[in-house]
Image (spheres, coloured by chain):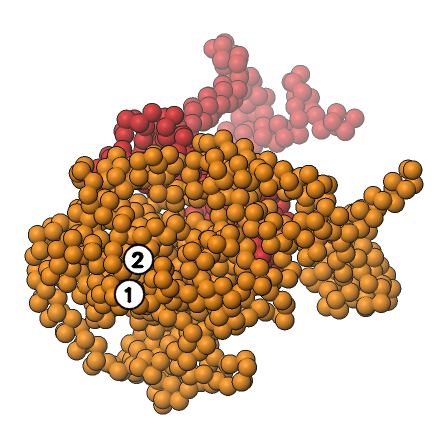
Chain colours: A orange, B red
Amino acid sequence: MEKLKTASDLEKLRKNLINKKNSKNTVVSICSGTGCQAYTSENVVKAFIEEIKKQKLENKVDVKRTGCHGFCEKGPVVVIYPKEICYLQVKPADVSEIVTQTLAQGKTVDRLLYTDKKTDKKIVTESEIPFYKNQKRLIFGNNRRIDPKDIDDYIALGGYKALTKALLEMKPTQVLDEVKNSNLRGRGGGGFPAGRKWETTRNASETPKYVIVNCDEGDPGAYMDRSLMEGNPHSVIEGFIIGAYAIGSNQGYIYIRQEYPLAVENTEQAIKQAREYGFLGKNILGSGFDFDITIHRGAGAFVSGESSALMSAVEGCVGEPRSKYIHTAISGVWNKPTCLNNVETWANVPFIINNGSKWFSDIGTKDSKGTKIFSLVGNVNNTGLVEVPMGITLREIIYDIGGGIPNGKKLKAVQTGGPSGGCIPENLLDLHVDFDELSKVGSMMGSGGMIVMDEDTCMVDVARYFVNFLADESCGKCIPCREGLRHMIQILDKITSGDATEKDIELLQELSEVVQMASLCALGQTAPNPILSTLKYFRNEYEAHLRGECPAKVCKPLITYYIDPKKCKACGLCLKNCPTNAITGQKKEPHVIHIEKCTKCGTCFDVCKFDAVVKKTGEKNKNKKEKTIVAG
Amino acid sequence: MAKEKNKTDFVGVRLTKEQTKALSKLQKNSELSKTDVLLRGLEILSEYYALGLDRPPLNMELKKLEQEAIHHLNELKKIKQKEDAVKQLVQELKDVDQIIDEYNGEKSALIQILLKIQAKNSWLPKPALLWVSERLDIPMSQILNIATFYKAFSLEPRGKHLVRVCLGTACHVRGGPKILQAAEQFLGIKSGETTSDFKFTLESVNCLGCCALGPVMMVDEEYHGKLTPSKVGDILSDYQKDTKKVEEKIIAQ
């Protein structure tokens, strides 16, 4: 690769690449995101390469491994361009049929197409599938067209155009103004205006200045940063360089979570290629601006995603937060001004520079502009990554894009904002999703996790799960968070085992408010959100637990398993599978569960084909009452 | 009585059957009388005794020498083992050196260096940490602070395969805890423990970042999604077999 020295060099390269691409007609793009790789997409890729060779189509067809397409539920996903034919759940055994039918003869293989559940019709093109049709794919859209390991793919699609525009046609302050005018808000959780943050660092007196990409996506249930970093690393890098130019920084760090090895691999490769073309290094594109990037891998600590903790980790120290009476934008890494933004925030920048702040601020609501990527997961039909304009309703996301709740179950709540967010009940589904609306109902945008919960989810158990998680991840530096969360778990344990009273709930509420007010960093300050929001919307469930009932039949101490003798066909399946031998029964006789031996693991419930195993709740208190009567 | 029968008297010397046979053979070859041969033999024997070689007998002496030789051999083996251990340690420290040099010995790269050591050994051996402390001039207390703070590090040896069961929110609502239970049952250990044969270490993690496939389990670098408790045993037993193959390979090498 030759270093590009001017803007015209880049345009020449782009033209060459486009011409080269046009000479080949068909492209088979196979999703190789982590999700599809788990479905062994690599075997599909190999099968395609082999079959194409076998049928002598190498000169007409290109095979491409791309980043995550987002429709992870139906992976591995294969899209054939230019017709955009989308095949879902493709197995290596299907490949020869696709090559013979579609690539050689131009016919579609109907059984691999998406079937619309409402009309039972087959849908051929990717963009017509309801999951994609109702999205606005801006940041995430190029993932499916790009091989993340090949910078040429990104350049051919207009990549690094924004960089040349910013570096050669605009002054740093003009870039800054453009971002400020766009009203881009940080996508990492807090929603702080990115432009204002940039300005603070730019105006800080100390030098050198640093910039950081935060890809420490620790929120359980969220993986959009991963898919962006893995699938289109150059879009983040381009935005990052533009930001550094506006801020006046010459050194950047990309902090990537330890659990994301593929993201590290692809980003390393992308940085290497960007250096070879001269987008990084000294005198970028002849503008006189120098900038380079170092990757810093995380080592597994949720709290390290907090900005001051992350900066401490970059310095090579323990990733604990500090009190921010001086903002990190003024005194961050090595006490120098440091601007930290989330992956998605940086990836928005090239779009703003290319299309202008006006175009960007036309998308979204009054105070939340642009689009947001959510990871739509949990009890929903179409799990995956969805990019939607701000202001869309939760109902549209869950039902139009997500396809509703599986197995005919009812929706109970949607949890947004990760462990620090809150649970939104079904009756608020018409809420317009943006930063402020979500905060108003006691939740938050967070990094964009959206976990759908059906009627079989116990909200007290969910609250306990989150507090447990946060107590585990609390660094222990400040007492309200460390001790407060520990005691909150104790109370929640008491509630979920049916031993609590009304007073415990009052204490829980009070404790939550103290932790919220007195904690050092955002982890502690937002930790009570799951409790407060469930107390607000699902207080009846807490009260049921006081009576010894778990309405969703989840909390182990409050349920018992029991075999309905009328339904039991004495097949012996539960008896064979029971790990503690708690089930007895003869042939042709209904089986019985012996409660004293039962560990309530639920295996019998899962294996029974006749729905004869039933969960009961409320038995515990009945026994208690009976006992007291006897004692009395 | 039977023994008595086997023996014959010869010039006042008691001989066994075999001795008589040997005597006849000698006599035939030497064309001397049996008595002459016997007397000559006794003469030689007395000469031998006169030399004072009877105590201790020769074969005992030989055994002693043999034992000494074995002892020395064992010592040599031990020395060789020690030498190998030292060589290995030196090699390990050289590897650590190489990792440190990759980062130009920068103090701020401490976490990155520890991550690479962890990836190489699957745990952080003490000599390696001491060496890092020496080279980077960072006190051991600070290194241990980091090694115990972050979840990626282990100060104890871990199994050949690292099994990580995801208990993130998406996996939690789709039955992740049951997957962990199944893995615990199959391996016979609790989360956070290592099997006694060092084949598996079981851990639960808070999110593996492929939530759409929940519940998810990761074995080494491979993801296994959309699990049911019954699938867990099948997957893990595949790795168990694989371990055998790996062991065979190591032995073959």
Q: Secondary structure at mark 1?
A: helix
Task: Give the residue pinned by disc 1.
Answer: A360
Residue drawn at 68 percent across, 38 percent down: A503
Q: Position of residue A563 (x, y in %)?
A: 80, 60
In this rendering, position of residue A440 left or right of residue B143: right
Residue drawn at 37 percent across, 30 percent down: B143
Image quadrant in which you'd find residue A53? bottom left
Task: Give the residue pinned by disc 2.
Answer: A184
Q: Position of residue A285 (x, y in %)?
A: 10, 58
Q: Position of residue B132 (x, y in %)?
A: 32, 31
Q: How many marks?
A: 2
State whether residue A561 is above or below residue A100: above
Image quadrant in which you'd find residue A83? bottom left
Residue drawn at 48 percent across, 70 percent down: A396
Q: Earlier in the sequence, mark 1 or mark 2?
A: 2
Amino acid at dot 1: Phe
Determine contact: label 1, label 2, CB under 8 Å. Answer: yes
Quadrant where the N terminus of chain A is found in the figure: bottom left
State whether residue B8 is above or below residue A315: above
In this rendering, position of residue A534 left or right of residue A159: right
- Compare residues B191 and A350 and report the one nearer the observer: A350
For mark 2, name the chain. A
Q: Secondary structure at mark 2?
A: loop
- Crowd tier of the residue under label 2, counting other residues whose Cα lies within 10 Å: few below 14, some 14–19, many 20 or above: many
